[in-house]
């Protein structure tokens, strides 16, 4: 008897995994390649120099072999280190959508000139704000000094790497900065940027050979240098990989039937993990005979806070063509497109019914109105997007008032204006009542069958 229960439990678990209740696809991963908003280096050898327009980001020291002035009996050499050079860099992390689950973040720098000897580079979080056009070894802005010259105050160590002298131009080195990005986005630390410092270690006279000078620093391409030399692929880059936050719309019902001149209301609800403001946009994607009929759509005021609900009123005009209309509602995440936020759209099917006219009547002057298209500005330079053109009416509700479509008239298939819409693939969809019904039906049938088999065994 116990084995029957075990088999039944496994069967139910397997069916649950396959049922539509569990068939929601998880949010996709997204990638961002952020470019610096500020990058420069500072030097202890030139304490008042501003290096913001230099072609390189320099990190390291210089080593000089010279005669020891304190020894007279014989010739003896000593090593003198000069420098150091520290590099500062900052990115705009607000380009990452709020609510994103960070999986990986890595800072990539590209070698312009390798060191003459290997050295370690140490990466720290900056605790003070700097302005790259004004910063020097002494000053972080034109009026504010570093607490400690060179930006050494209150070190917040992240990681280190070794740069080998065998690296060639264009080779990349990477710092793992996942923890840093997570701490900034969660509000644990202020985002003042990063500072890279050298850890040269001990340098022996024997390291010089016949030379009396060694460059124990590495030059990376700065954003200015890469642009100046037309090598955009060598711009410092912060690569961020994350799970898209979700902005999902659900609707109280997905089908309504109207008489001409009639109206109906539905409720739209937003849910998901996106933590920014969310608006509503919509467009008619299907209409009778490829004509967009005069449906009036009014959205009530809503807060735009995550988790809001809004009432939507749909009215059929007196001369609305009979048939089926499909209205697509989509979230507007204000500057964060569906390439970085997982959108869950919903469709409302409106059927306009009534008697067809037997007489030829005058048709009100047709109107063509185009609202704000759901533009998506991607911050990822390498993200592939497609552009479509549509002749359907499109509106975007972004304010606190109501938005209405055109009233009266009919529309020809050839549009008088076109709206370019940037779209990307989204996979998250709200759970529909029909899927729930099917899943529950499957589970009930399985339970009845299992109960019948257990009774027979007894």
Image (cartoon, helix red, strand yellow):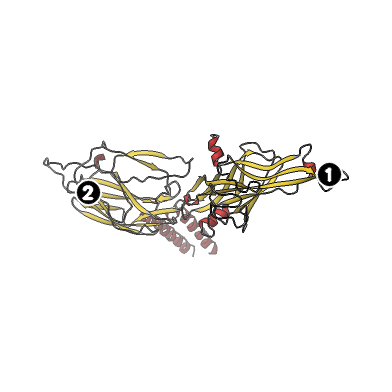
| CA distance separating discs 2 and 1 | 100 Å
Q: Is residue 52 visible?
A: yes
Q: Which residue carries the number 1 mark?
A: 76
**Which image quadrant for residue 111?**
top right
For mark 1, give the secondary structure: loop
How many numbered badges does the structure rendering display?
2
Q: Is residue 226 above or below residue 41?
A: above
Circle 1 packing at 10 Å, graded few (<14), some (14-19), many (20+), is few
For mark 2, give the secondary structure: strand
Name the spot of residue 249 as percent of width and height, x first: 37, 54
Residue at image point 29% right, 49% down? 349
Q: Is residue 444 left or right of residue 108?
A: left
Q: Which residue carries the number 2 mark?
A: 352
Q: Is residue 277 left or right of residue 395?
A: right
Name the spot of residue 325 as percent of width and height, x first: 27, 46
Q: Is residue 232 visible?
A: no
The numbered mark, 2 or 1, whose residue comes first in the sequence reads 1
| Residue 418 vs residue 26, the one in the foreground | 418
Name the spot of residue 99 as percent of width and height, x first: 47, 55
| Residue 455 vs residue 33, the one in the foreground | 33
Q: Is residue 135 left or right of residue 84?
A: left
Q: Is residue 324 left or right of residue 50?
A: left
């Amino acid at each position: 008897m116990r084995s029957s229960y075990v088999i039944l439990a496994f069967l139910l678990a397997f069916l649950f995994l396959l049922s539509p209740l569990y068939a929601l696809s998880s949010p996709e991963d997204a990638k961002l390649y952020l470019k610096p908003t500020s990058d420069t280096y500072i030097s202890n050898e030139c304490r008042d120099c501003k290096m913001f327009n230099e072609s390189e980001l320099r990190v390291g020291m210089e080593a000089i072999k010279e005669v020891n002035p304190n020894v007279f009996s014989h010739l003896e050499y000593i090593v003198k280190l000069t420098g150091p050079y520290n590099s500062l860099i900052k990115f705009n992390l607000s380009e990452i959508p709020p609510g994103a689950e960070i999986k990986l973040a890595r800072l990539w720098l590209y070698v312009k000139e390798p060191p003459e000897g290997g050295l370690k580079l140490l990466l720290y979080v900056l605790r003070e704000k700097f302005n790259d056009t004004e910063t020097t070894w002494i000053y972080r802005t034109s009026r504010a000094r570093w607490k400690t010259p060179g930006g050494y105050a209150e070190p917040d160590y992240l990681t280190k790497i070794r740069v080998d002298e065998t690296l060639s131009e264009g080779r990349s080195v990477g710092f793992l900065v996942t923890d840093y990005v997570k701490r900034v986005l969660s509000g644990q630390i202020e985002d003042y940027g990063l500072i890279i410092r050298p850890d040269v270690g001990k340098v022996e006279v024997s390291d010089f050979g016949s030379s009396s000078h060694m460059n124990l620093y590495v030059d990376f391409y700065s954003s200015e240098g890469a642009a100046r030399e037309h090598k955009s692929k060598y711009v410092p880059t912060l690569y961020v990989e994350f799970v898209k936050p979700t902005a999902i719309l659900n609707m109280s019902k997905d089908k309504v039937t109207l008489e001409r001149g009639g109206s109906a209301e539905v409720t739209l609800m937003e849910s998901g993990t996106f933590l920014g403001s969310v608006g509503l946009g919509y467009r008619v994607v299907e209409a009778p005979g490829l004509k967009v009929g005069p449906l009036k759509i009014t959205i009530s005021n809503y807060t735009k806070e995550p988790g809001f609900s809004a009432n939507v009123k749909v009215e059929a005009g007196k001369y609305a063509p009979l048939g089926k209309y499909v209205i697509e509602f989509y979230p507007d995440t204000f500057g964060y497109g569906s390439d970085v936020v997982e959108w869950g759209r919903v469709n409302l099917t409106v059927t306009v019914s009534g008697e067809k006219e037997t007489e030829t009547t005058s048709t009100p002057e047709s109107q063509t109105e185009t609202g704000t298209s759901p533009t998506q500005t991607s911050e990822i330079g390498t993200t592939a997007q497609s552009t479509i053109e549509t002749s359907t009416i499109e509106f975007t509700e972004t304010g606190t008032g109501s938005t209405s479509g055109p009233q009266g008239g009919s529309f020809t298939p050839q549009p008088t204006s076109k709206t370019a819409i940037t779209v990307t693939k989204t996979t998250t969809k709200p759970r529909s009542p029909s899927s729930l019904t099917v899943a529950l039906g499957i589970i009930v049938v399985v339970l009845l069958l299992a109960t019948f088999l257990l009774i027979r065994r007894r």
